[in-house]
Every structure is written in C-alpha cells, then in structure tokens.
Amino acid sequence: MTETVVGKLIETLAGGAPVFSAWVGMNEPAVAEALAREAFDAVILDMQHGALDFAGACQSILAVALAGLPAIVRTPVGEFATASRLIDAGAAGVIAPMINSRADAEAFAAFAKFPPLGERSWGPRAALPLSGLDTQAYLAGANRLTQAIAMIETREALAALDDILAVDGVDGVFIGPADLSIALSDGAKWDPRGAAVIEAAGHVVARARAHGKYAGMFCYDGADAHAMAALGFRLCSIGSDGAMLRAAARGELAAARGTPAGGPAGGPKTY
Ligand code: 3PY
Ligand code: MG
C-alpha cells in the first residue's frame, strides 16, 4: 500500500507533517501534472469553483498519479454521488463543501465509505489498480485509504462541529475561510484572515484534535500555508494554479520592463 500514490496521503497524514497541497481549478490534466511534478504532498482539484468537469477530474487524477502524487477532489455542493465516483476514479480524498450538520456529514460519509461506515457502491475501476491492492484488500482498506473531508464554512457548521466530527466516516474537516468570513460578518465582509476566522480556526483545530481527526485550511500562498500549519492545520493548500500563473507572469513582465511587480494591494490574494 505504501508504494502507491493513493496510499501516500494517509501516510503523510499519519507521519504528522502537514500535507502541503497544490490547488487546481483548470480543466486541463497537464496543469495538474505540471504542479504534481513539484514537491507538493498532494494536488487538490476543484470542481466547486474551478472549471473542472467530471471527465477532466478523472484525467487529472491520473495525470497527478503519473507524477507520483495523490489527488484530492473538491466536489460541487451536495454532490455526494460525485464524491463516490471520484473515489472510484482514483481520488485519494474528497472534500465536500458546505457541510453544515450531522445529517450532511452522514450523507457525505454514506457515499464515501463502504459498509459498515457508509453505503458506497462497489466499482473502484481506477482506484483499485492505483491502490496496488487485490480486491479483498482494497475492500478492507478503502475506508481508511480514501479520505472524506468535510468543509466548515458557515455559522451552522461551527455550531454543529462536534456532531460533524463525531461521524465515523468523516476523516477530517477543512475550513473555507472566505465563506466563513462572509458568514461570520453576516455578509458584510470578505476577510479570510480576519480575527473572527482566526478565532474560529483555533477552535476547529482543537475540536478536530479532540476527536482524533485533522483540520485543513484553504491558504493563499506559501507563507500563509506556513502560518496555518503553525496553528495546527494538517492539510494546507497553497494558492491556486491561476493565481500562481498570474503572479509569475506579473513578476516576469515587471522584470522585463524594469518596473515594480505590483500585485493585489494588501491582504490575502484571491484565487
Ligand atoms: C472558501 O474560502 O470559502 C473556500 O471554499 C476556499 O476555496
Ligand atoms: Mg467556500
């Protein structure tokens, strides 16, 4: 199991070091593969706000695997059946946005996990070969091997945090700091690194630990991921494909023209 890309995610998590992941929104396997050739621990493919469709996500999972990394896919809101199909396609983990209650978490886990934790239907067409296991061993190991990660990004989710973490088929939680800041300010402010989110972040890390689980955070660049890992987050994404491409382009153009690189004024970057 340890030799395979799917198993690498739980190995890194078990090792205790933070998982630093690339974040891909482009529906182009070559982009995911290019980032996977760098020394990330995983690549997150975003089907919620990114442009990836199901076929693109399947191809990107394989392109990332070719480069030796596990892929995690964020599904659109409420698409738990898609989570199941993505695990069949070889995703080492799935992130479900807007999990706001125990019922949401149970519905997600039902699609992500085989019995007794859930009701995942058998059909690991790419996951089985990528796991390096035989069918029986895959059945026995899949619930641990493939991670189900619930996003915490509303007031309701914070209120139900212990209930969500108590669901056996949920392996970890992942903060969406932009949505959380909007929710906590009742729609007044996009402030993903404001005091309200940072206070909630400490609480989420502590409650995840108390349940023997891990917390992750969407991060805006490498320095931000470093800071969030220092707060105890174990799965930290770093920027995005689009943001990195634009930042590199901006820097190179500035170098060519001999002008300051510029960039977004103050605060964290967006996608
Ligand atoms: C958020 O910040 O709300 C996210 O979902 C990160 O993509
Ligand atoms: Mg969000």
Image (cartoon, rainbow, N blue to C red):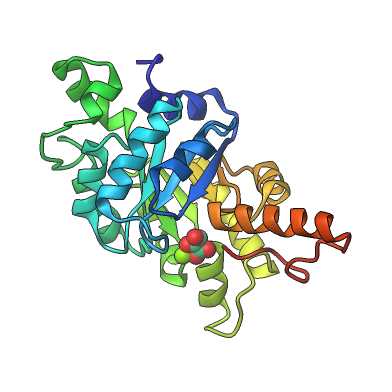
Q: Is residue 18 left or right of residue 61?
A: right
Q: Is residue 211 left or right of residue 269?
A: left
Judge whether residue 213 can be spotted in this image: no
Compared with 258, 87 (above or below) is above
Quarter where residue 163 is shown: bottom left
Residue visible at 37% across and 61% down? 48
Q: How many marks?
A: 0
Image quadrant in which the C terminus is located = bottom right
- Picture coordinates of residue 35, whole percent (x, y): 53, 39
- Picture coordinates of residue 44, whole percent (x, y): 45, 45
Compared with 202, 78 (above or below) is below
Residue visible at 39% across and 24% down? 5
Q: Nearer the viewer, residue 206 or 89?
A: 89
Quarter where residue 242 is shown: bottom right
View extreme (front): residue: 256
Q: Is residue 60 left or right of residue 229?
A: left
View extreme (left): residue: 122
- Picture coordinates of residue 59, whole percent (x, y): 31, 41
Quarter where residue 47 is shown: bottom left
Q: Nearer the viewer, residue 71 or 201?
A: 71
